Amino acid sequence: MVRKSDAAATVICFAFALAIGSTPLTAQTSQGPEQGTASAGTPRSTTAFPTVPPSVPYQQRPAAEHEVELLPDPLDLAPPLAPLGSNEQDDPNRLLRGPGILAPSLVNGFLGITQTNFIPPDPIIAAGPNHLLALVNSDFAIFQKDGTKLQQINARSWFGNVAPGNNAFDPKVFYDHFADRWVMTYLSTDLSTFSHILVSVSDDADPTGDWCNYVFRGDLNGSTPDSTLSDYQGAGFDNSAVYIVPNQFRLSDLSFRYVKLRIIPKAALYDTGCPAVPYTDFWDLRDPANLAAVVTVRPAHTFGTPGVEYLINDSPFVPGTFMTLWSLTNPLDPSPTLSAVNVPVTLRNPPPNADQLGGSSTLIDVGGPRVRNAVYRDGSIWTAHSVADASGEFARARYVRIDVTGPTVLEDVSFGNDDCWLYYPAITADVSNNMVMVYNQSCVDEYVGIRYTGRRPLDAALQPSVELKAGEANYVVAPGSPPRNRWGDYSGVAVDAAVTNHVWVFAEYAGSPEDTWSTWIGEVVASRLRGDVNADDAVDVADVVLLVDIILERVTPTEDDAAAANCNLDGALDIGDAVCLVNLILTPTSGPTLAAARPNDAPESVRLSEAAFDPVTGRRIVTLEAELGPDVAGLQARIGYDAARVRIGWPELGDAARGLVLETNDLGGELLLVLYARGGVFPARSGKTLVRLPVELSGDEETDPGLELRALKVADRSGTVRRPETGSATLTALPTRFRLGEPYPNPVGQAGTQIELEIPASIGPALSGGVVGASSGGPVRVVVEVFNVRGQKVRTVLAEELAPGQHSIRWDGRSDRGVRVGTGVYVLRLRAGTFVENRKLIVNQ
């Protein structure tokens, strides 16, 4: 597919330079170590910067890389572990906008950093005890975990105190849980004369406040100049040191040279006095079997104390048949040891560049098969990258887990679907080795969005994906010659330092209007199945019952319970989640889809009716009346009332809700109500009444306390929530005694007269006189008659049962025989049981 033109799509090859043949096979796998020292740093405080940085002119990220095709392995020394495509797993949620039954739980999601002056943004994230630190190429932002952005600072300005005129790019960040410090790194170069590795370290676990800023020269190997610049670095750490691992390019012609490993001991780097910092370099890292220069080596974020810092890179050949695992021991010694071994993996080919909904005049640059990050935990190193599917037409997100003691591959999965491209994955494992992987996805029918998946240790396969943020528009921003539609260059993932089974993800998506990027942040719990509200490792009716209790505020959920209960991923626990969960259980293999919901464009409304009496039961009834679309599968209401004056009886289903499930919780002043279908949608309605609420008023006040519909939501079958118009009900106070009102007009003319009656809700036994319903508040028999002055009955105006309340009747001035009565004085009488009340009437005809 092509956007804006029919030109053939250009495939941009992986950025790599091959050095095979330039070194004898007996050569070592790296040069070094050599020591060097960075000059003393300079203090920096976030308090010196505004909340939002000033705007600066648009620019591309500096690009040192030259695109060079990967070449075949000339020695064919490493057969693959398995053939091409044998590790592919299709994503069951390819076409789902709702989650699958095994999808990881989403706790929270919110907007990250919106488009700045840089392309691409290179989003990366770290999560501390109370804050998040999100970085892009131009800026970094400090967030609270509820999504509140505390500050956004321009990276150039931040490092301006140690590197004036810098052009900070390629951000990396982590929270060091060993030392409770934040570490940021950026790079800076003019592509011809200098190369800086910019490092910033916080003074404590709070990223707001004081830091130390440093400049490490990227053109030195130890203390020896080498006229190279650093690009696309990785940043890792363990309990001993910080590790920065960039690709190095010649300053003279920007040709690729090698990978460098810089070891920075924490003792000096974390000193809040910002002293000079020693470091140790290895450089010219080479494949241990073929002795080719490797590219893009990633140091691990290390959890635990294995006594080794592990690093990993993908094969420098095509097809790729192995990954290289590096082991660094004794990093703080003057002569640390760096060794490498190739680990056979499933054969892979580089991923093709990506298309999208609407097509692309220049395909999206997916960055080749370089590994993007690495994490070590409990004897395993995890990494992820993008690879081609077996057909070579589409790209998949692949992760590999290696047991470092073998080393042997434990897991190797290539995840995706036909018609889609998955790229820039980032991976981590939580405290229980639950894996989370976030990535970008675009499809022939989908803009570039963000999805994530996960796998628990005992899961048979990778969990179905969840859409964190959908792409909103087409994206083609391809300056340069040849043009490159830059994306990525990576995504961010981090384990929460305080809640260590939670994982934060951060990635780029195509925003709106077209050709605009933005970022989104999400908090994920991979240890809990989507919909497993009661944490019993199954999704069934017990979870529906507990979810309804949560919605009705009978139960307060834990944070993890709430994440699992948020079935429709909208961040609110409501009727949408109940409907989503019911349908998830009924259709576990596919989950709810948008196709299950019929669109509704007609106006919708739900209102409480005015109170009326049920003629059968004699109870006062308020009804919930609805005009809803045909796709509604659930309804949730919050009804407020004056608990001192109003009592609500047991709610009942109305004629329009037969077969539905009704659950309520009376909080005393608020009635919470949930109504949902047992799969499918509400039945075709012959009427409008969904729920009937028996009500009683207490006290002698005649003011109207009312019932207020304070909140209302309806959900379609996919769990999508909308809010119809609402209306509240009037509860007129009931009379406390019988009363015959003054007729009007009086004297009575040709048009007759209006007579007002009040019937009390209850009467004492002395007045009941055997009247049916008189002591229960139900209808009572009432007689209204007209007599002449001789005591003769002229007309029976009314003789029937009336419900308690106000009533209005009319006398037309005629007798029982239909003849107009003569001018004179008459008596109007009300009788109910033993109660009698008279009014004088004057007729003037």
Image (cartoon, rainbow, N blue to C red):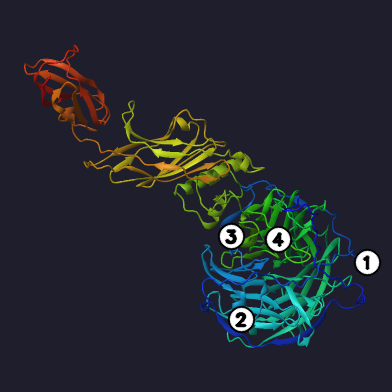
Alpha carbons under labels 4 and 2: distance apart: 32 Å
The local secondary structure at tag 3 comes to: strand
Mark 4 or mark 1: name the one nearer the start of the chain: 1
Amino acid carrying label 3: it is Glu
Residue contact between numbered discs 3 and 1, judged by CB atoms under 8 Å: no
Q: Nearer the viewer, mark 2 or mark 3?
A: 2
Q: Nearer the viewer, residue 257 or 560?
A: 257
Q: Which residue has dot 1 on it?
A: 75
Q: Which residue has dot 3 on it?
A: 523
Q: Quadrant of residue 191?
A: bottom right
Q: How many marks?
A: 4
Alpha carbons under labels 3 and 1: distance apart: 45 Å
Mark 2 or mark 3: name the one nearer the start of the chain: 2
Residue contact between numbered discs 3 and 4, judged by CB atoms under 8 Å: no
Callout 4: 10 Å neighbours few (<14), some, many (20+)? many
Residue contact between numbered discs 4 and 1, judged by CB atoms under 8 Å: no
Alpha carbons under labels 3 and 4: distance apart: 16 Å
